[in-house]
Image (tube, helix red, strand yellow):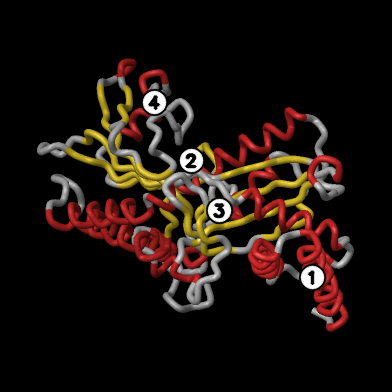
Amino acid sequence: MSEASDQRKDELLTKVRELIDKRMPADKAERARIFTEHYYRHTPPDDIADREPEDLYGAALSMWSFGLERPPGEPRIRVYNPRFEEHGWHSTHTVIELVNDNMPFLVDSVTMELARQGLTVHLVVHPIFGVERDDTGAAQDFPSLKADPSTLPRESFMHVEIDEQSDPEVLESVEEGLRAVLSDVRAAVEDWRAMREKAVEVVGALTKKPPKGLDKRTVEETAAFVQWLHDDHFTFMGYREIGFEGKGSSAKLVIDEKSGLGVLRDPERQVFEGLRHLGALPPEVQQTMFEPSLVRITKANRRSTVHRRVHMDTVAIKKFDAKGNPVGERLFVGLLTSVAYNQSPREIPLLRQKVEAVAERSGFEPGGHS
């Protein structure tokens, strides 16, 4: 970051403050100055170097005004094309304004959804504010003038600019897509702790009461694998419990509608297309579901709407009856973390068994060049 760029940013924001003082009453201007200063504080100078003070003023005050009201627990989203005559400022891009409770994955998930819709992102401004609101969602102290604003609930104020879109249906589609993504982000974040607790339950059940008839080491390795997932190697995004019913053409999977967490709160949300109608699938697929194996690790048909737009990783732990017959499964969906991908396979439960088996069958000297 060059000194000239920093100076240009300072000059622009000085002019923005002058516009605030000129156009707003003193009591309101003070809050507007505090908001604007924080709003642009971490914006790279080069991102706004070619902007007019009038437009920087308009963008910040537009976001301020937009964020004054927000229903509790819900995002506010606006997608529009700013025009001087209507909004008091101008942009050559379509502007997206989002106000939401601050939480992980927001920027990644929003930009990922825009990319999915084929839209190019030109600018992201994303300050975090401490905001005090009443029960209706109206801001009472915003931005905070208190000595310690960190004590207030944190909210995300995101300004995103994309290629200008003139079709109202496109603008509506952008908003609908972002609203769905933010709903998934909220569900995954709110239920994250509960999903981790489900993983702990699985480990406890496998350790204290292992399924009848299964190889002891496989059970131990599966318990160790679920514990490994829990230990920051897996981003938990969804969980549900599934029952197996019927056989042959009448076989089906039954979702426990009360068990869903995260992005699987909705029992209608599918992870594997067509798998619910198990009886209509080839016999080999049915056999995989009903065989007495303990764990099934696969990729989902669906791509993640949270964090990274890739096919989600799924881990299904079978449930068995007293006779050792599979009667259902506990399904976790999410994404393996970068730490997991960078770890040696010889250190990962279950996978290390496969590595050992391959090495043993190769007949090569351990540690040798071959």
Rounded to the nearest whole Å, what is the CA distance between mark 4 and mark 2? Answer: 14 Å
Three-letter amino acid code at disc 2? Answer: Ala
Rounded to the nearest whole Å, what is the CA distance between mark 3 and mark 2? Answer: 16 Å
SS label for mark 4: loop
Who is closer to the viewer here, 252 or 164?
164
**Residue 54 as seen in the image, left or right of residue 31:** right
Three-letter amino acid code at disc 4? Answer: Arg
Rounded to the nearest whole Å, what is the CA distance between mark 1 and mark 4? Answer: 57 Å
Three-letter amino acid code at disc 1? Answer: Leu
Instruction: Point out residue 163 in the picture as x, y percentages from the top left corner.
Output: 81, 45
Give the mark nearest the N terminus, 2 or 1.
Answer: 1
In the image, which disc is placed on residue 307? 3
Q: How dense is the environment of label 4, judged by Cα within 10 Å: few (below 14), some, or many (20 and up)?
A: some
Who is closer to the viewer here, 74 or 360?
74
Instruction: Point out residue 96 in the picture as x, y percentages from the top left corner.
Output: 70, 46
CB atoms at circles 4 and 2 under 8 Å apart? no
Q: Residue at coordinates 62% horizontally, 37% vertically from top-left?
A: 177
Instruction: Point out residue 16 in the picture as x, y percentages from the top left corner.
Output: 80, 66
Q: In the rendered image, which residue does mark 1 sit on?
A: 13
In the image, which disc is placed on residue 300? 2
Three-letter amino acid code at disc 3? Answer: His
